[in-house]
Image: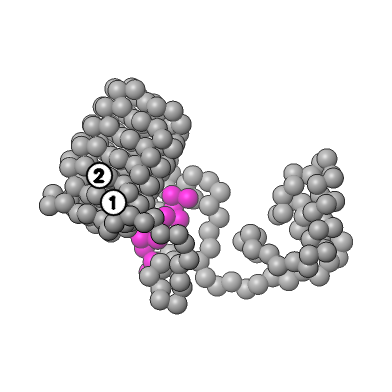
Amino acid sequence: LASMGIYIFNWDILKKYLTEDEADPNSENDFGKNVIPNLLKDGRRMYAYHFSGYWKDVGTISSLWQANMEVLDPSHSGINLFDENWKIYSRNSGQPCQRIGNDATIVNSMVSEGCRIDGTVNNSILFPGVVVEKGATVEAAVVMGGTVIKAGASVKHCIVAENVCIEEGATVGAMPEGGLNIAEPGDVATVGSGVVVGKGATVGPKAMVSSDVKDGEEQW
């Protein structure tokens, strides 16, 4: 039994329990920890929906990375973004289609609109507007919108937030010794929004970077 975060309430009941929960100084003000248990304790009628589709708790860095990797393996994971019966309702980025250069290599990856790829992308998901320059390598990575990965940079087994600049020759993350293992991902490096990773800098596989990394600097 899992709380998927989708609920249907009678408004008067929901309002009552939310008001009481807000007034409780000992409450964490959490649906799963406080509100629903209080409903259950008071004997309120509650029903569960039997959901047979894909669902995943992405409350950790590793599980978020894992969920993105599972998108690339629909036959085993059960999540298929190309299912004609499952429409995707979302805003369009308004960017042109992706451009794949003559020297680019892309294997088992999702490359969104507006991306410009001249390097190597393997088992990765690139959000809109990502740039991978010639000689750069992206592997088992989730790279969010507007990020630029410059020539000779290596970005592996990590999550990179939006509008990051990874300068020439920089290294972010590393593949595990045993290779890619979606079921047991292990360490996943992260780079926060807007960060600049300097030339030749290193962000280790366990690092969580939220501020700029200087040229040649190492963060583990």
Above-or-below relation of 109 to 199: below
Q: Which amino acid does label 1 sit on?
A: Cys
The residue carrying pointer 2 sits among few (fewer than 14), some (14 to 19) or many (20 or more) residues within 10 Å by Cα, namely many
Q: Is residue 4 magenta?
A: no
Residue where numbered disc 1 is placed: 115
Q: Which amino acid does label 2 sit on?
A: Val
Element under disc 2: strand
Give the residue at the far bottom of this rendering.
Answer: 85
Q: What stretch is highlighted in magenta?
A: 64-76
Report the disc number at residue 60. Answer: none
* Main secondary structure found in the magenta portion: helix
Q: Disc count in the image? A: 2
Q: Does the magenta stretch include residue 71?
A: yes
The disc, 2 or 1, on the residue closer to the chain's N-terminal end is 1
Rounded to the nearest angstrom, the CA distance separating label 2 from label 1 is 8 Å
Residue 108, horizontal then vertical, whole percent: 28, 59
The mark lying in front, picked from 2 and 1, is 1
Left or right: 108 in relation to 206: left
Q: Which residue is found at the position 65% from the left and 72% from the top?
A: 49
Q: Which residue is found at the position 76% from the left and 58% from the top?
A: 36
Above-or-below relation of 29 to 16: above
Residue 188, horizontal then vertical, whole percent: 42, 41
The residue carrying pointer 1 sits among few (fewer than 14), some (14 to 19) or many (20 or more) residues within 10 Å by Cα, namely many
Which quadrant of the figure has residue 91? Answer: bottom left
Residue where numbered disc 2 is placed: 132
